[in-house]
Image (cartoon, rainbow, N blue to C red):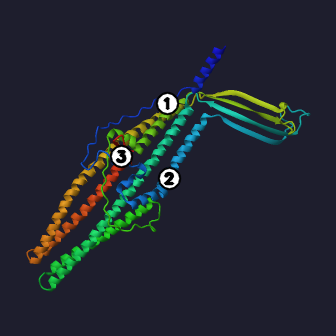
Amino acid sequence: MASARHAGAAALGVLLGACSLAPPLKVPEVPAAAAYKELGPWTEARPADRLPRDSWWTLYDNAELDGLEKQLIAANPTLAAAAANYAQATALADQARAGLFPTLGLNGATTRVRDSLNAPLTTPATPRYYNDFSVGGSVSYEFDLWGQIRNEVRAGEANAAASAADLENAHLSLTAQLVQDYVLLRSLDRQSALLDDTVQAYARAAALTKQRHDAGIDPGLYVAQAQTQLESARSQASQILVQRALTEHAIAALIGVSASTFSVKPQLLRIGLPRIPTGVPTTLLERRPDVAAAERRMSAANAGIGVARAAYFPSITLGAQGGFQSTSVSNLLSAPSSYWALGPSALMSVFDGGLRRAQVAQARAAFDASAANYRYTAIAAFQQVEDSLAALNHYHDAAGEEAAAVDAAQRSVNLSMALYLQGAADYLTVVTSQTALLQAQLQALNLETLQLTASVDLVRALGGGWEDRLGTASAL
């Protein structure tokens, strides 16, 4: 007898634990090389210390940038929306989890009733008017025999985890955008200062040509050429101010303040290019929040297949209710006024015109789409790292070459001016040399900015900061 009870209990446990109709999750394979193709001498094997993901921008060693990043985290509307979406996804997961537990309810009512004299089974002795008092409760529990509720919970938890990764990705993207805008702002400050100095130099040259023209040494053509070059430089200086204003406005929007009340004081600041350890490609997919979000949505879609397939099987619910009912309050809680009901119920759809088959097909297609999106996101992650590494490498080489071009252009200006003053060269030679020098100087500043921008892109492509674990650098 005892063995029979044990066997029955075991069978009930198996029945209640039941099965899951979701297929085993198969994550698509993404080919990863042993090392990145684009590597340069500027990279280090590992960082000097830990750089937390939530403050990776400290790598650029700028207190003003640190303050702006804190304002962004506190007040950026896009980041706030991502946090709200995560809270919503968490609440939805909690809603799904509630299905694992019984539903309990309490009820009470007091009613004055007038019955129809023509109602069935009514006799002259039946009271026409009476009171109806009741108080009771109910409990209902759906057995998750086919794993429908558990798969709904798994899907909800996976979607919540994906939303958390979305929040982390929004944090990374927005903070990276702010670093790039700040780098551009300081580059524009340096370009503006260069153009202001150039305008002053061109103004002195224009004055010199006018003096020489007034003395009968230079023709009026030289004066016109010098004045043209001067006004062109002034125009460039004004255009730089436009770019700076727009960049400043973009920073204001990122930190959640009005562009009308926000300003960043111009400052001649050269931001150093950091050394960034890249780790190895095989660990990249563990670092990227967007890849994590895609993988978790794939897991949610896989659980959705189990939910759809469970609709083919009956749902079994155990219900119970009981309480007290009487026409008088005085004997409401007495034994004769009690009532109860207990029993299971089952519901199964026999014919639905292909609805369940279509729902399973839809769930499988949704999983296939999420799997393809995961694979694309992972492949794009490798591309973005390689793109950033290539940009850093080649911009590094170009910057060195451009620095040599600036030196050569400066020598050309000095020589052409000396020849002009000696009467051995016309002023067009001076103008050409000065224009080439300005273009080389502006390009050199631009290449510095491009390298810094590429470094931010690399940090973002790697998934944020990094830490030294057992002597091996890895991004967080």
| Image coords of residue 443 (percent x, y) | 24, 62
Amino acid type at mark 1:
Ala
Which residue is located at x 68 percent, y 36 percent? 104
Classify the position of the C terminus by image quarter: top left
Asked if residue 405 shows in the view, the reply is yes
Q: Quick one: SS at disc 3?
A: helix
Q: Earlier in the sequence, mark 1 or mark 3?
A: 1
Distance from the alpha carbon under mark 1 to that under mark 2:
32 Å
Mark 2 vs mark 3: which is more N-terminal? 2
Q: Is residue 149 left or right of residue 193?
A: right
Tag 1 near tag 2, CB within 8 Å = no
Residue 173, image x, y percentages: 40, 52
Give coordinates of residue 189: x percent, y percent: 32, 66
10 Å crowding of disc 3: few (<14), some (14-19), many (20+): many
Helix, strand or loop for disc 1: loop
Left or right side of 176 for 226: left
Mark 1 or mark 2, whichever is nearer to me = 2
Q: Position of residue 40 (x, y in %)?
A: 24, 48
- The residue sitting at the top extreme is 1
Above/below status of 365 relative to 187: above
Between the residue at mark 2 and the residue at mark 3, the CA separation in whole angstroms equals 24 Å
Front disc: 2 or 3? 3
Whether tag 1 and tag 3 are in contact, CB under 8 A, the answer is: no
Q: Which mark is residue 462?
A: 3
Q: Amino acid at mark 2?
A: Ala
On residue 81, which mark appears?
2
The residue beneath circle 1 is 22
